């Protein structure tokens, strides 16, 4: 091929060589890139320097003193030299890249060997950093392993690791049994499962594939009770093989789900704490809404009945601390329980106490200050609510804690009234009739005039609960303050000296860790216990009725 045949010097519309001016422009264009075909012209046997001769020159005018050679345009020679230098640089880069590819490949073979389970994806790079479509590599050329893709089936170690990732990512129980096909799908097709943002839609789809939200994932065992809106069954989860409590709420065609069920679901799904009952799953069908809770053996009322209403003071302290710990978690998130009573406090065989039944609970927002006074079971309802107050805060729960504290220590309810009037009469007779000096603003409450006609001096706490020591009586008095603003909070109560025997470590536990992980905390045998601290129930009749219904 001669210079006239080269695409570098050939005009597209003519087979004649390009003019000198066009050659100069092509050679000296700034940033001009030359392909291998263009540079191959310089090495071709038909390369002719006459293509770069001045058109106006003649042999006679181009002769030098020695009588030989032609006069060559100096600019053309300089441009030609630049082309040669560019070609040399490109060849050197190619040689360097080739050496680098060989070095990387040698290291790769040394580290991983000739494993057939690794697929290598090659990517060719141009000198300007852009990627080109990779061509099929030749047999004698070693390509750089830029990307690695696993093609083999995941090993058992990889599967276990993936299951841990999935359970942690989806906040699942540690012993959940994931379907094999789902585990394989996540391991092989979604290696970046942990790094992807988890949207609500993606999480729901993942849980549905595992088996959550499906009624066939649970087996009903025994019927525990039935109420106006719900029927409760003892069941077993096929996903974890654990016992669960199935609260089946009937849906009316016109009314839909009860507001208490909606409120309970909306609050419990975000409450993750060791002393709050866990809502595992929600199953929604056309005829029912089933709430799947963790199963606990009994409630606090049954526990006190089993031990003959005489509890060990060590157990009283442990149960009270766990109750305050759960309330502290709720109040910190501005959630009021509003229905504390022994039937709504569940206890398992380890002695772990958990708050349940959030049907009357309320997330207290800042702009809203008025609430219903038709809350809290009568025996555990505070005097400010009984007198008609609708402006209350976390103190509404703390009065109930004091009543439960007394009931555990004394073995009987503190204020077992039958009506609002009877309830206020028992409170005033025991603690004294409140006055403006004791409780500022009490005379402005709607029902105060009607219920404060008789003045009671009250009794001393030690006379009504002699089992409590000095610290216990002091804490009980702080719970039963008439003035809601003076009533102790859950945050302050857990640090009261009454709990000093539990040690300082109990205050440093994470929210989801039980206090029974500490050696200082362990339940003891109750003096009035018939068989053991936690006898097994033979029947579920009458079990935590108010919590479930």
Image (cartoon, rainbow, N blue to C red):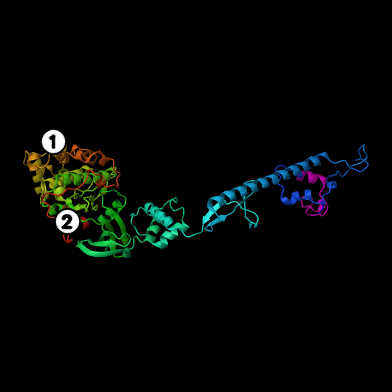
Question: Above or below — where is 503 with respect to 376?
Answer: above
Query: Magenta stretch: residue 14 in it?
Result: yes
Q: Looking at the rendering, which quadrant does residue 259 occupy?
A: bottom left
> For this rendering, which residue is in front, 481 or 515?
515
**Residue 162 placement (x, y as % from top left):** 41, 55
* Label 2 crowd (10 A; few <14 / some 14-19 / many >=20): some
Element at label 1: loop
Question: Residue 320 or 248: which is nearer the viewer?
Answer: 320
Residue designated by label 1: 438
Which residues are drawn in magenta? 3-26
* Secondary-structure class at tag 2: loop
- Nearer mark to the viewer, of 2 and 1: 2
Q: How much space separates mark 2 and mark 1, taking CA atoms?
A: 45 Å
Q: Give the residue pinned by disc 2.
A: 535
User: Can residue 499 be seen from the camera position used here?
Assistant: yes
In the rendered image, residue 455, in percent from the top left (x then y), is placed at 6, 39
Q: Position of residue 354 (x, y in %)?
A: 23, 50
Question: Quarter of the image holding residue 230?
Answer: bottom left
> Would residue 387 be seen by someone viewing this image from the given angle?
no
Determine whether, in the image, residue 33 is placed left or right of residue 374. right
């Amino acid at each position: 091929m001669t210079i006239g045949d080269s695409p570098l010097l050939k005009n597209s519309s003519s087979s004649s060589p390009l003019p000198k001016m066009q050659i100069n422009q092509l050679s000296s264009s700034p940033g001009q890139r030359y392909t291998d075909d263009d540079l191959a012209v310089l090495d071709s046997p038909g390369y002719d320097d006459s293509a770069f001769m001045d058109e106006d020159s003649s042999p006679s005018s181009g002769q030098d003193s020695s009588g030989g050679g032609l006069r060559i345009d100096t600019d053309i020679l300089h441009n030609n030299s630049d082309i040669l230098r560019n070609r040399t640089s490109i060849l050197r880069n190619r040689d360097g890249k080739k050496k680098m590819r060989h070095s990387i490949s040698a290291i790769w073979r040394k580290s991983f060997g000739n494993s057939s389970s690794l697929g290598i994806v090659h990517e060719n790079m141009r000198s300007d950093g852009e990627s080109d479509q990779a061509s099929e590599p030749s047999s004698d050329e070693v390509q750089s392993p830029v990307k690695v893709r696993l093609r083999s089936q995941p090993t058992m170690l990889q599967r276990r690791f993936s299951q841990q990732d999935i359970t942690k990512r989806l906040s699942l129980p540690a012993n959940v049994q994931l379907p094999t096909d789902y585990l394989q799908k996540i391991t092989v097709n979604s290696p970046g499962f942990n790094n992807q943002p988890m949207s609500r839609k993606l999480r729901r789809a993942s849980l549905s594939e595992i088996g959550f939200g499906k009624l066939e994932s649970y087996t009903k065992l025994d019927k525990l009770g039935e109420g106006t809106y719900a029927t409760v069954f003892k069941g077993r989860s096929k996903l974890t093989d654990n016992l669960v409590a199935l609260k089946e709420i009937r849906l009316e065609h016109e009314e839909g789900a009860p507001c208490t069920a909606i409120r309970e679901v909306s609050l419990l799904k975000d409450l993750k704490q060791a002393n709050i009952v866990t809502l595992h799953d929600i199953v929604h069908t056309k005829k029912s809404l089933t709430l799947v809770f963790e199963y606990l053996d009994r409630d606090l009322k049954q526990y006190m009945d089993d031990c003959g209403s005489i509890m060990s003071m060590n157990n009283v302290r442990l149960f009270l601390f766990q109750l305050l710990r759960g309330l502290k978690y709720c109040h910190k998130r501005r959630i009021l329980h509003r229905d504390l009573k022994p039937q709504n406090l569940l206890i398992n065989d380890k002695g772990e106490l958990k708050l349940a039944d959030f049907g009357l609970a309320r997330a207290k927002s800042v702009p809203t200050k008025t609430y219903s006074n038709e809350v809290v079971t009568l025996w555990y309802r505070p005097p400010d609510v009984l007198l008609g107050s609708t402006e209350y805060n976390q103190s509404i729960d703390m009065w109930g804690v004091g009543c439960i504290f007394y009931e555990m220590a004394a073995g009987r309810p503190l204020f077992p009234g039958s009506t609002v009037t009877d309830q206020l009469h028992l409170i005033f007779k025991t603690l004294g009739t409140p006055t403006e000096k004791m409780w500022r603003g009490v005379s402005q409450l709607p029902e105060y005039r009607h219920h404060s006609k008789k003045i009671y001096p009250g009794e001393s706490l030690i006379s009504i609960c002699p089992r409590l020591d000095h610290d216990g009586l002091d804490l009980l008095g702080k719970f039963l303050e008439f003035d809601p603003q003076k009533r102790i909070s859950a945050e302050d109560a857990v640090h009261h000296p009454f709990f000093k025997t539990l040690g300082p470590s109990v205050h440093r536990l994470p929210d989801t860790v039980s206090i029974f992980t500490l050696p200082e905390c362990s339940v003891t045998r109750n003096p009035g216990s018939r068989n053991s601290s936690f006898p097994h129930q033979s029947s579920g009749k009458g079990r935590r009725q108010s919590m479930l219904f």
